[in-house]
Structures are given as structure tokens and as C-alpha cells.
Amino acid sequence: MSRSRTTTRVCALFVAPLLALVAACGATGPEQTLIRTYFNASNVTDRGSLANITMYAWNVREKGTVTGPTVNSVSEERSRPLRVKELEQAVADAVAAEETFTQEKIVYQNENFDAINRVLEAEREEADVASGDSEVQEAWTDWRARTMENSKAVSDSQQAVSAERNTAYLSVQADDPDLSQFDGQIVSKDADVTATVTLDGNASEQQLTVTLQRTILENGDEPIEGRWVIATVN
């Protein structure tokens, strides 16, 4: 075997693993394109483009413009169950609990109507309540606090399911499927990115972690596989 052929073979043995390593790092993969599109749109506040690829807003005024983002590596994918069904049940439970509480509150209010009015009037005037109304004042204070707690529980559960739905819809974009009818997975991965960040005229090279996410809906033998979108940037 000639020296040139031997050299070529040896080089191939070293170059092939190197190319495989570069591919595994994802430096020129689809992550690169998505991340560059995201920052290009963020730099000019292109809300139309951003609405199609992310729900996370990179605040240029506070964090600066990002140019030349380069993906150094991409983590292994991780997944968690899609929680729409679970969170919708939490909303239903919170609403039911609030309704039960409200009925109990109405009963107490009707039974103590006059005393409650005296308590409210004394509170408005910043005066002491009559000694006979002190127990009602204490009870009514508790009822009001629990009213706020129940209302917050409903609001929090509604916000949680809305966020989960929006995350799935952004990735899937498939004729607005009724997500409560699907099981599925939220899949995530992190891209380690080097970029130039310019804020107030000062440019610096920074390391950013961009989390990408997609939704996979279970649909018999043909799952609905959503596209990758930007979840967060740190």
C-alpha cells in the first residue's frame, strides 16, 4: 500500500469520528436555524414571526440585541406527560369547591345579615364593633379570606391549563385539536449557544441556554408530532 493511501485511510479513521461528534453537537442542525430566526426576529421586535415560534419574549431593551448565535451543543431530549387532562380536572375541582363554599357562605350571611351589616359599618367608620358582634366580625373576616383563597385557586388552575394548552398548540398547530381528548408528551432539549450581546453600545460574548420544546400527541398508531419551538432563554 502506498504512503498516500495509508495516510488517507488514517486520516479517515480520525476525521469520521470527528464529523460524527460535530453532528452530535448540533452546531449546524435545525436548532441553529430556529435559534437564529428567533433572535433575528427579537432584535427587530417582529411579533408576527415570534408568535409562530415562541411564547418567550427576549427583552431587547433590558438584555440587548443578540447577533451571531452559534449552537455549541444540544442536550439529550427529556420528556414529561402532557398535563391538559389533569389540569382541566383541577379546574373543575376548584370551581366545584368554590361553588360549595359560596353556598355555605350565603347561608351564614343570611343567618347573620344584620350583624354583618353592623360589622361592615363599624369597619368603614374605623370604629370598634359592639361586643355582641365580635364573633360575627371574626367569622366574617375568615369568610372573606377564604373567598379570596377559593377565587385564587380557580384563577391559578385556569392559568395553568391555559399555559399547557398554549404550549401544545404552538408546537402542534393542527386545526386546534381538543387537547382534553389526548394523552401525549412535552419533549424538551437545551442548546448551549455562544452569541454576541450588545446592550447600550457595549458588545460582549455570552453563553446562553436556549430550551426548545415540542409536543407529541398520542393518536392511535399515528401520533401527531409537533414542531420544535423556543420555550425559554437563560
Image (cartoon, grey):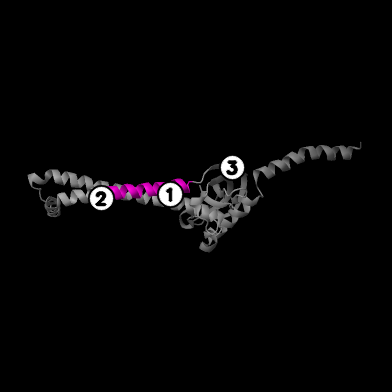
Q: CA distance from mark 2 to mark 3?
A: 48 Å
Label 3 is placed on what type of residue?
A: Glu
- Residue at the image position 15 percent from the left and 49 percent from the top: 111
Of the residues tagged 1 and 2, which is closer to the observer? 2
Between residue 61 and residue 122, name the one nearer to us.
122
Residue 25 seen in the figure: yes
Of the residues tagged 2 and 3, which is closer to the observer? 2
Residue 156 placed where, x, y %?
37, 49
Helix, strand or loop for disc 2: helix
Between residue 71 and residue 187, name the one nearer to us.
187
Label 2 Cα neighbours within 10 Å, binned few <14 / some 14-19 / many ≥20: few
Helix, strand or loop for disc 3: loop
Q: Which label is found at residue 88?
A: 1
Name the quadrant of the N terminus. top right
Dot 1 or dot 2: first in sequence order is 1
Mark 2 lies on residue: 103
Helix, strand or loop for disc 1: helix
